[in-house]
Image: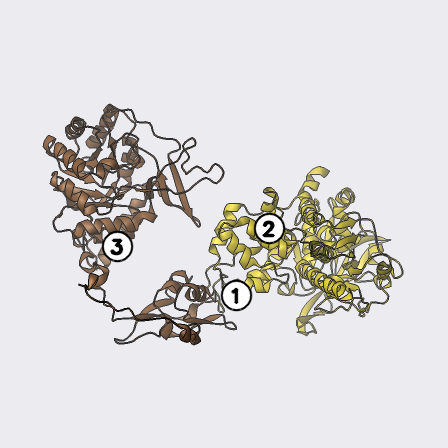
Chain colours: A yellow, B brown
Amino acid sequence: MGINDVKDRFRQMPPGMNMDQAVVEAERCLLCHDAPCSKACPAGTEPAEFIRKLRFKNVTGAIRTIKSNNILGGACGVLCPTAVLCEQACSAKMFSDENPGGTDRPIRIGDIQRFLVEHSREIDFRPVEVEDLGVSGNIAVVGSGPSGLSCAAELAKMGYKVTIFEALAEPGGVLRYGVVPFRFDDDFVEKEIGDVKALGVDIRCNSPIEGKAAAENLLTQGYDAVFVGPGLWGAHALQENSTDIEGCYSSVDFLAALRNGGIEEIISEFSGKTVAVIGGGSVAMDCVEAAARLDTADVNLIYRRSYTQMPAEEVERIEALQHGINFYILHQPVEFLTDGNRLTGLKLVRTKLGEPDESGRRRPELIDGTEWDMPADIVIEAIGNKAVEESSDWYPGVKVDNRKLIQADPETGATSVPGIFAGGDIVRGPALVVEAVQDGKVAAGAIHKYLSDKE
Amino acid sequence: MAQKKPDLSIEFCGKKFMNPFLLSSSPVSNSASMVERAFDAGWGGVVFKTLGSDRLRIDHPSPRMNSMTVGTRKMATVQNVEQITDRPLKENLMDLLYLRKHYPDHRIIHSIMGFADKEWEYLAKMSEDHGADMLELNFSCPNMTIEGSGDQAGKSFYDIEHYTSIVKKAVSIPVMAKMTPNITDMTETAMAAKNGGADAISAINTVSGITGIDLDSLVPQPNVFGRGASSGTSGPGVKPIGLRFISDMAKDENLNLPLSGMGGIETWIDALQYLLVGASTLQVTTGIMHYGYVIVQDMIEGLSDYMASRGIMKLEDLIGATLPKLGKTELFDLDRQGVVEYNLDKCVGCGQCLNVCTDAGGQALSWNAEKRRPEMNENKCLSCMLCSFVCPVSGLIKYKAMPEGWKRDETIIRDPSLEKELKYEPYVHDGDPGCLV
């Protein structure tokens, strides 16, 4: 396998639906009254409406519904865990005790949504336009992830001048650097962000707002309001400075490297190696899937709880199993094994499930005398993201909690500093793209109200 | 207990048909190599693609057809601009001889169309001389580009009677006249055929219609190099029209001719419904265009099992069985009323019932948003049945007859206070009682 062949496995996501498939799916929709799918969408993307429009051959209208409610509707169509959101609520879902008349399976809402957004590009139809409410004002947005893009788009639609400050080389935040490209590829990222830029939003990359009170200071530098949505780019680790060990990655660094020029280095480093990924969430699944595409010898997933307790979506877990990932469930890593500073493996202890913990899930307990050493050349810790250590310094006046998450009003995104609003993971902790989109929308409305009231 | 197999054979114009299922005269019966596949699949006979005399050249327009998709249902109706056969008569007759020789037990009906008296006579004789069991006179193709032919003749009582009598005088085999539905009352055109000596009537030929218009070129489809036309439309969408005309003719005691029914037959249920309103043979094209000859196997099996389940052993016992129950709307018993009844055990909570009842029905439903279930005020139900049509769960909503004397509530007056502004006076009818005689 040449480097380019391996790179190809990362470059593109699998194709979505075509028009015929989407129409067949829309035809199955029951066109519910007070549709549960629409109520279940955290960002109000209104599946019931866009599916009805597709059903009645109002294809451009369907695209308008998605994009005007959710500027990142394409990203959500691809990335949303629909099985626990809109599709979970779908009345057409499978026959079950709660749904004894159920037909077969839920409508593939996410796939239809993705199709319609991709179709909009095919027919060059861009329905979201600046409405110009006669407003004026400069808004700064910190971070070009889902919450920032959504907030920026909503404000730009109203007629505000919006500037996004992005620390990294390319815009998108978690859409680009937190998701593997074969789930959401560069081309799709570019096009989604293109829809935001088309509204006149100025996205400045390589422009970190860091240092003492840098975010707050924007208010004195010509900006009338600031939206803070930097996301969570710190990585939890099993032991302090674990990533200083040679061969040890955080999921944050690993996933970002796949998008950067770093991929060639990753390919040569991973080739032929045994990789262990620690964690049971969607990010861990992305990491094992990526590792499996890197011509590795073995990819082992290590999770301290049971299979059904994994936070990753069912489909992701099944896909990983199908791709030959070895699942070591009920295993707790207790030590990184090294030769000098070079990783050689993990010391694992088997666990059993005890009484429920504060999360309501049964707590994994170590089983004495079950220690064993798993050889590994590379370990990726995918056990959660957290706020960057110094992030609170950027906005010292803004109240944060002990995890350095910003305390913002859930109804408005307003922080303790007037004029500074916040949303996305930096407020919620690790959450969904679609929830960040909603935060951005909510904050945009609140910023508009804040500026209107000020006048 | 082993049950005797129902007998699907039928006698039609004195000829024995092994089953009532025939290819109709169309692209699906265009050649022997097609028809033999159909016979091998189980079809009992064929009305061969309409023969012409070669005097006037036939060119089919291109493209020949358009399909109307309804939702995901392809070919819900199909529109064609085909004419009669474009093959030389000699070649058609050779194919018909082949079929006659190899399929002696199958019924082979020659469809013919002349453009002049002598031509009808000639084609009739040619057909009889080459083994036709029967003739079908094509008075009904709506797509002919030759003036005065096809359904233009079929809309003229004179032409129908005249050409039929010419053919009857020329041959001794039974003659069936095929009728166009693009008229008002088929009993009249059929009677013209009977007056000319016709032994049977077949109907319906295609309904003249427009299935679509191309939105770029604004040309009706099929777009024949920049032009479109109203032309022959067929398929499931025309079944109600076919059943109507067949039943009209079957009920007409003066007509009293055997009928060959067609129009939208795809399944044994469609076929059975045509039999029930009086057809004794059945013809199919569009169903075959969509699915191939194989569908006859499901029609035969489905019909046989239906008959067996009801202890009906002979097909003829079904023919016209519905007619005594089919009449005019003025014969309805309007004193009896009913409502719909919901069994919500299997409700999925989609609320389509609520939508249709509120916007198109009696506004009899309210919505329990918490449970996502409809709640009905029986006294407002119109028994329109719309809710039962849109409900995704079969059998959840059923009709329930109410006891004699039951009356539903009057439709609600939106603002009763407007009564004081009324200038209303009741209608008083003096003199001639008009239509109530």
Of all chains, the one bearing label 3 is B
Q: Position of residue A91 (x, y in %)?
A: 50, 63
SS at mark 2 in the image: helix
Q: Amino acid at mark 3?
A: Asp
Q: Quadrant of the N terminus of chain B?
A: bottom left
Mark 1 or mark 2: which comes first in sequence?
Answer: 1
Q: Label 1 to label 2, Cα distance in Å?
A: 23 Å
Q: Amino acid at mark 2?
A: Arg
Q: Is residue B207 visible?
A: yes
Pointers 2 and 3 in contact (C-beta within 8 Å): no
Q: Amino acid at mark 1?
A: Asp
| Tally of numbered discs | 3
Q: Is residue A111 visible?
A: no
Of all chains, the one bearing label 2 is A
> Which quadrant holds residue B63?
top left
Q: Nearer the viewer, mark 3 or mark 1?
A: 1
Q: Position of residue B335 (x, y in %)?
A: 25, 71
Question: Badge 2 is on which residue?
Answer: A114
Q: Position of residue A268 (x, y in %)?
A: 77, 42
In the depicted view, which residue is nearer to us: B187 or B233?
B187
Question: Badge 1 is on which residue?
Answer: A34
Tell me what residue is drawn at x 52 percent, y 65 percent: A34
